[in-house]
Image (cartoon, rainbow, N blue to C red):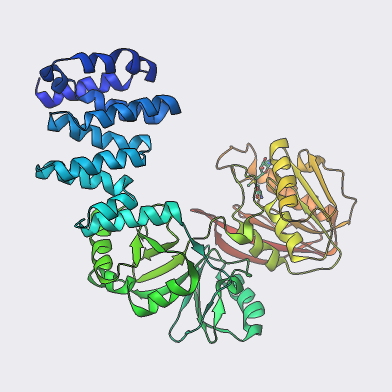
Amino acid sequence: MSGADANKELYNELRKLTPDELLRDEIPRFDRASPRERAQRVSLVRAAGVVFSESGSKAQREIVRAWLRDLLNDHDEKIRRYAMTALPKLGATAEDERALLTLMKSSSIEREKKFLAETLEKIGGVATLEQLPALAPRTEQKVKAAIARTEQPGRIRLDHTLAQVSGVRIHLRGRDGLEMIVRSEVEEAILRSGKFRIVSCTKGLVVLAPTAPFSLGEIYALRCFGTLAFLIGRTDMAALPAIITAPDTRRIFDAFTEGTVRYRIEFVGKGHQRAAVQHIAEKAYARCPAILNDPRQALWMIEVRTDTVELRPRISPDPRFAYRQQDVPAASHPPLAACMVRLAGPMNDEVVWDPFCGSGVELVERAIAGGVRALHGTDLSAEALDAARRNLTAAGLDKVPAHFACTDFRAYGGLRRGEASLVISNPPMGRRVPIPNMRGLFQDLLQKSTEVLRPGGRLIFPNPLKMDAPPRGLVLVSRQPVDMGGFECKLELYRRG
Ligand SMILES: C[S@@+](CC[C@H](N)C(=O)[O-])C[C@H]1O[C@@H](n2cnc3c(N)ncnc32)[C@H](O)[C@@H]1O
């Protein structure tokens, strides 16, 4: 067996041991061993990093970190290298950083210095910046980003204004099929302010041009779009560093960032592309060291799409949907729920029923729009109903009378004939939990809605099936395709005649 294979085999064995076994048997055995034997058992150092990071207690991790720090003084370069690679896994501290810096200063081995730089990229802080003035730009950028992230993570400012708006393009993206609804909300709410004009509306995308200074908060007052981003260039790999650091891009960064600008690059639909990201980040840093690439908890996302490069503020949770305290596995996409509310249109004194209410996103969205007399939610899952109650409270809608019942929707007796004015729902589609008779379920939904709706009342839901004519008394108003996150449905709106 080759040395590499033996190392791997030993690693696989040690990796299966518990933290207690490693601490009791393997680490003392390693410490007692001769230099030759230690070199043969160096895989223990790697295994310890993994095992203690996954399942060690805090106290055990401290013991192991101290052990790894000691190993940084080992006379064997390989053991030192393994120790420095294992340290970041255990959440290295300032003490570990000091030990690594001491070694960096004394080492004359190029390979070791390279590994030390990589480790300091992960755990380095102010001491690294101060003590190693000749850091490689790549390491320097990562260390600066880590310091900013931990000491002053910053945030996206919704209340600040972008003053210079000439040439700015805002991309409001959403699920395919919903763009006309997004557009209508923009027209109604924002155009009234006179600050924007609509440039175009295509599949899943509404493009706006601001005509006056604006804040992100003004756009986040809209509920129907999915994500917001600024168009900052046309896709050209060689030009990306210049696009990221261009004066127009920096104006957007500066206007809306509190703290250090940290961004992440994503090649949409193309996976990680680590080498390309590294290359672009280094070039961008050389152009503008105030803007830092940081894959972790970045405030901004540079989205490289097929044709466009877009700059998206990362605001998490989305302030519009922060009421979502609790989720269910098939929870609705909130902007879709908001679109359904919009498509159903307003009605005063609304009595709403969601027969499959889950965590209540549709009910909350309808209640936020106002004019609701009562909400009714049914679901087979008691946990989902608890989530719906919590979300309603978190949305500040405690005062809206809400009735929840853990029942099959067909058996719900909480609504009299003709009492409801809106039935709004995202029904089960049988994707996660198989539904024995899907068609029957949707026919029953139409039938039950016909019974509880008052004349003029509406039923709106995404329908995965092509149905026969609706029951007597229910008229199909509109039927439009909508992407449900990878599969298509028809968003159907009916009116009770
Ligand atoms: C797609 S989820 C609804 C998600 C919900 N709109 C939300 O935002 O969380 C469908 C829900 O229907 C419920 N359900 C399935 N069959 C039902 C039935 N016959 N009667 C009532 N609820 C049912 C499931 O428990 C599930 O919570």
Q: Position of residue 488 (x, y in %)?
A: 53, 56
Indicate the quadrant where residue 241 lies.
bottom left
Of the four image quadrants, the one with ligand 1 is top right
On screen, residue 331 above or below 419: above
Query: Is residue 203 in view from this perspective?
Result: no
Horizontal arrangement in the rendering, residue 350 relative to residue 296 (left or right): right
Q: Nearer the viewer, residue 459 or 349?
A: 349
Indicate the quadrant where residue 430 lies.
top right
Q: Position of residue 138 (x, y in %)?
A: 24, 57
Classify the position of the N terminus by image quarter: top left
Q: Which residue is drawn at the image coordinates 36% and 25% (left, top)?
A: 63
Query: Is residue 289 in view from this perspective?
Result: yes
Q: Nearer the viewer, residue 402 or 330?
A: 402
Classify the position of the C terminus by image quarter: bottom right
Horizontal arrangement in the rendering, residue 202 relative to residue 111 (left or right): right
Q: Position of residue 6 (x, y in %)?
A: 15, 21
Q: Which residue is drawn at the image coordinates 30% and 12% (left, top)?
A: 25
Farthest residue to the right: give it: 416
Indicate the quadrant where residue 148 lies.
bottom left
On screen, residue 119 above or below 462: above
On screen, residue 280 above or below 10: below
How many marks overall? 0
Q: Nearer the viewer, residue 452 or 214?
A: 214
Q: Position of residue 367 (x, y in %)?
A: 76, 60
Horizontal arrangement in the rendering, residue 28 relative to residue 391 (left or right): left
Q: Nearer the viewer, residue 228 or 306?
A: 228
